[in-house]
Amino acid sequence: MSPGPDLMALARAYGISTEYHDWRGRRIEVASATLIAVLAAFGVDASSPESCRSALHTRRARRALPASVVLRAEAGAANGRGTEVTAIGPADSSPRLWIELEDGSRRYDLANVRSRPGPAHDQVEYDFALPAGLPLGWHRLTGTWAGRTLSCPLAVAPHRLDTGAERGRAWGLSLQLHAVRSRQSWGMGDLEDLAQLALVAGQDLGAGFLVVNPLLASSGVEPIDPSPYLPASRRYPDPAHLRVESTFEYAYAPAEVRSRIDELGQDLRKANPSGDLLDRDLVWEAKIQALRLLRDLPPAFRGPGRDADYRAFLRREGAALRTHATWMTIVAVHGTHTEDWPDALADPHSPQTRAWQRAEAAEIELHCWMQWLLDEQFAAARAACERAGMPYGVIHDLPIGAQADGADVWSDPEVYAHGVTVGAPPDEFNQSGQNWASRPWRPDKLAETGYLPYRQILTNALRHAHGLRIDHVMGLFRLWWIPEGFSPDQGTYVSYDHEAMLGVLTLEAYRGEALLIGEDLGTVEPWVRAELAGRGILGTSVLWFERDEDTGRPLHAAEWRSACLATVTTHDLPPTAQVLAGEAFDAEDWLESLRREGLLRRGAGEPETVDALHRYLAWTPARLVGVYLPDAVGDRRPHNLPGTDGDAYPNWRYPLADGTGAPVLLEDLATNARVRSLARALRALG
């Protein structure tokens, strides 16, 4: 049923699209049922024209101060440009505003430039000009009038990030860490493997960066979801990535404890040279047992300095870490589906949850302690990239969302939209659409928190990263919301304040001196790419998709954009060996283009063709050239088939292997003939 005018007006007031254009360019009108369900996720009753009009009146009511203010610094300056904010107050009392800066000082030089009647008969709207010259950072806009004092967060973001142009061009590896096993890892790649790979790639092969899949927390409950792009939390990493033997505690543990730990990892280490699928359940079961043994050691084995370091970590992370650890202990007992929990535990702040925390204090402390170990090993991996001389270092990956019943949603339920999930509308490759089973943020509630959950995720992601890849960066502009019980094609787009989302992102990246890469593949409007580039966020260009808009022919190397990470393929596409075997899609026009350019001889084999494709990327002006690690060793198997589940295909469970399916271990990469040939083809990229 077509929506009525009141429903459409209400939807638009909340940034909900009432129509959109599909991948064929056709205009699609969003059904009333979808709009009503999406509005319900905002806590709005839109079931009748009367309720829509009432809700629209409430929506249009203005708050005394904005929920949050995010400014962008002027071009060529390191401080915020002047802008205006509106304060609303009673007609008989004009407001007085000032800015409390992050360093504790204040700015009072705000000018009241105009006033006008407010939304209610006894109110006045006052427009204030904020001063220029505000420093970058998080401040507060504060006002007092009619005996009230109110404030809101005020962020000043950089106009444009430094994209590292002075570091020149570089090539690097893109990888799924779980697939990169060494002879010492316990059945899947870990953070020590990442550090070792950095040294091999940087010093032996000349790579300038590593782009690593998300290493974020799973539930730890069997069967563990293997997808790195649907974690339980986007804030905290997964202890399954720890190398137990690299911890301080293992090094100083009694011999009998080390022996027991070695036995736990023995069978998993033996499995590394096999081509068997990765088994995260076995890995986690062994590692949690080993880590419990280490945590149970007397404090004397750690020393007072190490205990002090741990306490400092706990202070830095605060209540958020304790809440995350609490969730981990609840799901271990009651499972990952919140409908199976005792009702009182659904609230992270309930008296029953507090009682649970007291009863499970030791188990909660174990999960906090494991996060500290992870913090140390992430720092070591970053340091290895620097020691290897990589100009761009380690670039971590931030997925678009987390599990709908995961730790993040439980910890901050008020900022998430319940009753909907995120996905994608139908497109050329998935004509039924996609449901990614993650819970979206409510834009209004996110602003009311001063974007705190977003900031916390970014801060932790950037702490030990030289850069951050933002998966589906369009999600900072709009997301496809799907009401529960509806099919993916029955969703609609919900807009976010992209100026604020990009401002928060670039401010946190500026503070972390980090490079940003946006995954802007698919249907992305040109103005969005221009906005990202204007902020200093690199884009993503995949060879198979780079075609002339008018003719559809392969895009000439000179016409590629420079501000991007260029690759031949991605983890969501077939590996190049499979494409060249004719088992995926037709790439003949690209191969013919390379032949015309003199990069590829006729009759060339698959390894030589892979080299030629990457040489072509080196011909483009792209700042970064990425090599998908399975391509470097000739792996023919897709590591992920979008749209399939674990029953239909073993997504994210393949170990790294060559074209015959024989495992390729970390120790073999430096001497692998294919890897060395590809490195030679790219080594002189700068």
Image (cartoon, rainbow, N blue to C red):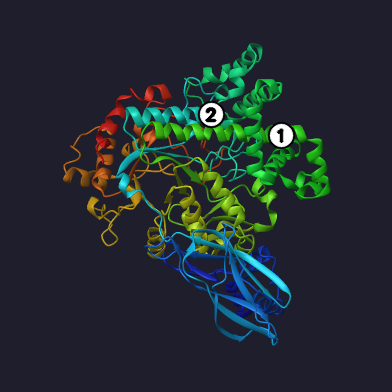
Give the crowd class for mark 1: few <14, some 14-19, many >=20 residues within 10 Å.
some
Q: Position of residue 636 (x, y in %)?
A: 39, 33
Report whether 290 appears left or right of 112. right
Select label 1 or label 2 by which is in front.
1
Residue 344, relative to residue 491: is it above or below? Answer: above
Q: Position of residue 304 (x, y in %)?
A: 66, 27
Q: CA distance from mark 1 to mark 2?
A: 29 Å
Mark carried by residue 278? 2
Q: Which residue is mark 1?
A: 365
Quadrant in the rendering for residue 95: bottom right
Amino acid at circle 2: Leu
Residue 362 quadrant: top right
Answer whether labels 1 and 2 touch (C-beta < 8 Å). no
Q: Nearer the viewer, residue 364 or 224?
A: 364
Kindly tell me whether residue 419 is visible in this rendering: no
Image: 92 above or below 510 = below
* Res. 683 mark: none
Which residue is located at x 57 percent, y 34 percent?
A: 374
The kind of secondary structure element at disc 1 is helix
Point out residue 292 in the picture as x, y percentages from the top left corner: 68, 25
- Image spot of residue 191 (x, y percent): 51, 31
The residue under label 1 is which amino acid type? Glu
- Which residue is located at x 22 percent, y 34 percent? 604
Whichever of callouts 1 and 2 sits on the residue coming sooner in the sequence is 2
Residue 427 as seen in the image, left or right of residue 283: left
